Amino acid sequence: MCGIIGYIGKKTTKDILLDSLELLEYRGYDSAGIALFAEPSQGPVVRKVAGRVSALRSVCEDLPSDSCAGIGHTRWATHGGVSDANAHPHQQGRVTLVHNGIIENYKELIKEYNLKDKLVSETDTEVAAAVLDTLYEGDPEAALRKLVSVLKGTFAFAVLFSDKPGNIYAIRNVSPIVVAMTEHGALLASDVAALGVHAKEYAFLPEYQVACLSAKGILVHDEKKREVPLQLMEIDWDTSRGGKDGYPFYMEKEIHEQPDAIRNTIEPHIVNGKTSFAEEQIPDSLFRENQNIVVIACGTAMHAGLIGQQLFHTLANIHTDVAMASEFTYTNPVIKPGTLVIAVSQSGETIDTLEAIKYAKKRGAKVLSIVNVKGSTIADNSDYCIYTHAGPEIAVASTKAFTSQASVFYLLAIHAARLNGLLSLEEVAGYLADLQKIPEVIGKILDRKDFIKSMTRNLLSSDQCFMIGRGLDYSLLLEGSLKLKEISYIHSEAYASGELKHGTIALITDGIPVVALVTQSLLASKEYSNIREVQSRGGNVLLITKQSLYKDMNIAEEDTFILPELEDMFMPFPAAVVMQLIAYYTSAAKGYDVDKPRNLAKVVTVE
Ligand code: M6R
């Protein structure tokens, strides 16, 4: 969480910092700040505010345009509330820094270094700045090394030293820092989203190495002061290009990008009517020898895993568990020989997922990850990685990443079934052909988005909502419900319809909106009985189904959405898009900032 940017070069530092922070706002947006050398002999000037980057701009107008080095930060509060004082950068003596992560032993450090009277904020970050100032004796690299040797926790720091106006320094452990050289100067950032507008290539700063940026270049040193060569990667996405493309919010744009995202994700893996993971060098033995799969992920990514679980069961007869990554390490999970862990993450930086991966690897599991951001930490820590090609996802609410992750699970389950002799080549080709039709089917849903918008009228007047379904429908509704609550702030619960009568039906009263999803033939009649139970208690049902499963339940036409007819197995795709649009239009109609819901951040790098 939190976005970091640093720039040193010939262009106007202030503008580069502020523009980049706007691109990084999705990582955190409760406060923002910059520091730059307005006058090299006088140390960096800091400007920071509680609020968005737009508010920061207005307090930076008087800063000169000829300063050469600066750092910036957009915050998601962890230690200390949202206030000007707690915003980064933090300045202590000769040190000005921004930080991503959490310093766990900050209280001990305050005592050990006698810092109490020096601190003006409530943050762990300012403690790190004060310790660094104490340790600094003119050699930034040495001081940074001493600093990280006394810190416990996670960190990515970008640092200015008052007496080194020609340099920016960085060091990190778990939280990422990327660096890039351009014709006009050097940049560092918390992620590549901020670099695309300036650079064509970037590199990850390895853990515990010190980067020193100057207008001439980027030097990285290891603990023995040996130069570490940068592993350059091409930047193949640029979040600044195209912007919202005429849509009012990124979320709507990203919902519309799903046909391309899925196409780009699946096509490289379909070769002559067969699944192929040759490019990722995934050996066939991975699905032949491992007959136990554990999917670890968080939030939306975990919901993609729930779809995957049913596919592995149904098609490949492989036992599959889905674990919340944040709980995984604390539940003594059973990792036996023959367990394959599949980790799913859009950002590739979610710390809960990363920690779960490390735990599983220590116990001997092979880890295959499904990741959207190239070269990210999770990709780097996995034995094998399949990239989704969804492109940059900026809205906090995940949409195209979800359907792209799901599409990889379809490929993997079909692949595993083929390798284990459970699907003939003909059946494989048939399923893959169905999968290849999904982008077109999603296009059909998007054509009817105005109807979906009109379906939200019942939700707008309610502060709660239930969603019911069975099997794949239930898994999909967990995602639909998360979407609705995270951006519209309506309390929404997804329930397996059959579970309602075991307690939750007590909450169904007159007029409560209940979204019912019925797309699975074998479960439809039971689902309709559950719908009837809800209607008998006054629930106001919105029905989403397909024509072949439609049943007249006395639900108004305007509250019924008929999905395109597909094999049951593929119904989560069109249903997902309907649920995303329901959440989107509800949030937009309530006047919320859809892309930046309260209290959330796109990349979750704290446990
Ligand atoms: O980057 P990741 O996919 O690892 O993120 C996991 C969750 O934080 C994420 O899916 C979150 O639930 C969504 N942004 C919600 O829409």
Image (spheres, rainbow, N blue to C red):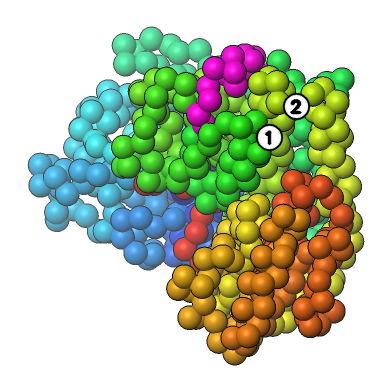
The region drawn magenta spans: 279-293
User: How crowded is the residue under tag 1: few (<14 C-alpha within 10 Å), some, or many (20+)?
Assistant: some
Q: Residue at x 87, y 20 (%)?
A: 272
Q: Which residue is mark 1?
A: 315
Viewer-closest of 432 and 195: 432
Q: Residue at x 37, y 15 (%)?
A: 222
Is the CB of the residue bearing disc 2 within 8 angstroms of ligand 1?
no
Q: In which image quadrant can residue 461 be found? A: bottom right
Q: Find residue 576 and report its horizontal and vertical position in percent.
A: 71, 56
Q: Residue at x 62, y 43 (%)?
A: 310
Q: In which image quadrant can residue 562 be found? A: bottom right
**Mark 1: amino acid:** Leu
Viewer-closest of 348 and 559: 559
Q: Which residue is mark 2?
A: 423
- Left of 602 or right of it: where is 417? right
Q: Residue at x 45, y 54 (%)?
A: 75
Q: Which mark is residue 506?
A: none
